Image (tube, rainbow, N blue to C red):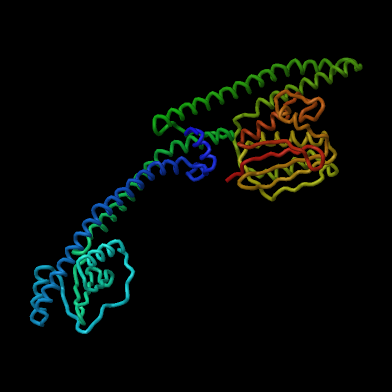
Amino acid sequence: MTVAPLWRKLRKRLPALRDYTPKTLFGRSMLIVALPVLVMQIAVVFMFFDRHWQSASTSLSEGVVGDISVVLELYSENPTMQGLQKVQKLSLEKMNLSVALMLDEELPTSTHSSFNSPLDRTLRRALAAKLVLPFWFDTNRFPAYVDIRVQVGKDVMRFIAPRDKVYATTGDIFVAWLVAATLILMAVVLLFTRIQLRPILQLSKAADRLGKGLDMPNFKASGPTEVRQASEAFIKMRERISRFVAQRTEMLAGVSHDLRTPLTRLKLQFAMMEKTPELDAARKDLQRMQEMLEGYLDFAQGESEAESVKLDISEMLRELVAQLLTEEQLAKLDVSASLMVRVRAQSIERCLTNILENAVRYADKVWVSAYTNDDMIFIIIEDNGPGIPKNAREQAFRPFNRLDEARNLNTEGVGLGLSIARDAVQSHGGHIRLDDSSHGGLLVEVILPASR
């Protein structure tokens, strides 16, 4: 088996690395910096402890144990009080060791847990290598000294040695300096990363507001060259979209205005003519043309630059239900007390009006509910009408599309009802979907971001 298939097989069994890595750009940037620094620091500490600190501590421990061996040998040659005093004076002046003879004593049997257990092992190895007599030591009782005791016959000879003669005390300073330097480095990286990511966050916020139909006039290109280029491209895109929407609205508004004049003249002429079946049919066609023009204009104004306002969508729903539905048509109204959103009021009102009118047109009973969950507002309108087949729902959202065998939001119009509704919802960063109702008809769910 080659390496590539083996790696693919192994990768399927192992958990994905992305499940354990940060999801944000800031977290990943910090990981890119912190991980190499951490690996480097671990390598440096390992090399320092393994090669320098342990070696130096071993040499120091062996030196002190050698001094202890000399003192014991000198005392064994003259085990008298005078010999002891001579040895004490020599060890204190020449070896910086404090020596005391504890008469009729035995070595302690208790042991103390040490924070420097690796160094304790070094001292124990040195004592075991050079001394044949029983020994005992304690490195924790005195902060600056090490207590070493050796059994000499029925007595115990006690040695008090400075800690820096036994251990390389610079290791603690080195580790403290290493940790402090790492913290300072990470603080600088943290500050620098936040500054560099700020333009990206502003670009993301501007794109999100654009998707919701909100403007961000103070947004400017800033940051590194790549981010600045992306920001400038976004600004140009926003200008092109705004220009396109404005041109579309102006064009259809102009067409509507130009056609209203001859339509008005035709209405006046029809009003002065004698009523006949043919004239009634012509009047209906004329009214139909008027409705088509209004539909075109509404569709064009779906992305208008009207100001967004903060309002209670539940209050708007109650008002629309009261206007469009009778008591017999309304089966149930379950709307939360207050659902605050920031929207263009006219656009969302047109969206909900189209959906409610569609439900009233094709059904006997309508169910309306609205609630909030996870910073999103859900508006659900159900009916017991014929519904829309599942394979035709996406087609129903297309502009100027009319469903012949199913229902449509604008059957008497030009097939723009669902398009207007979806444009209005998506321009606010929301989503609209069609589904089967539990009452046998159509379920329309409108999802909008709640106002914070």
Q: Position of residue 335 (x, y in %)?
A: 72, 48
Nearer to the camera, 101 or 294: 101
Image location (x, y in percent) of residue 394: 71, 29
Tell me the residue at 66%/19% (across/down).
Answer: 254
Up/down of 369 relative to 417, above or below: below
- x and y percentages locating residue 239 in the rendered image: 52, 25
Figure check: 378 above or below 258: below
Give me the residue at 33% from left, 46% from top: 40
Asked whether, in this view, residue 332 is left or right of residue 379, the answer is right
Outermost residue to the right: 276
Judge whether 132 appears above or below 415 on screen: below
Residue 346 falls left or right of residue 215 = right
Q: Position of residue 148 (x, y in %)?
A: 22, 72
Corner quadrant of residue 257: top right
Q: Across the whole image, how many numbered discs are drawn on residues?
A: 0
Q: Is residue 438 left or right of residue 199?
A: right
For this orientation, the residue located farthest to the bottom is 104
Horizontal arrangement in the rendering, residue 72 relative to residue 350 (left or right): left
- Decide which of 285, 25 is in the foreground and name it: 25
Is 265 or 8 nearer to us in this picture?
8
Residue at left 79%, top 47%?
332
Foreground residue among 199 and 284: 199
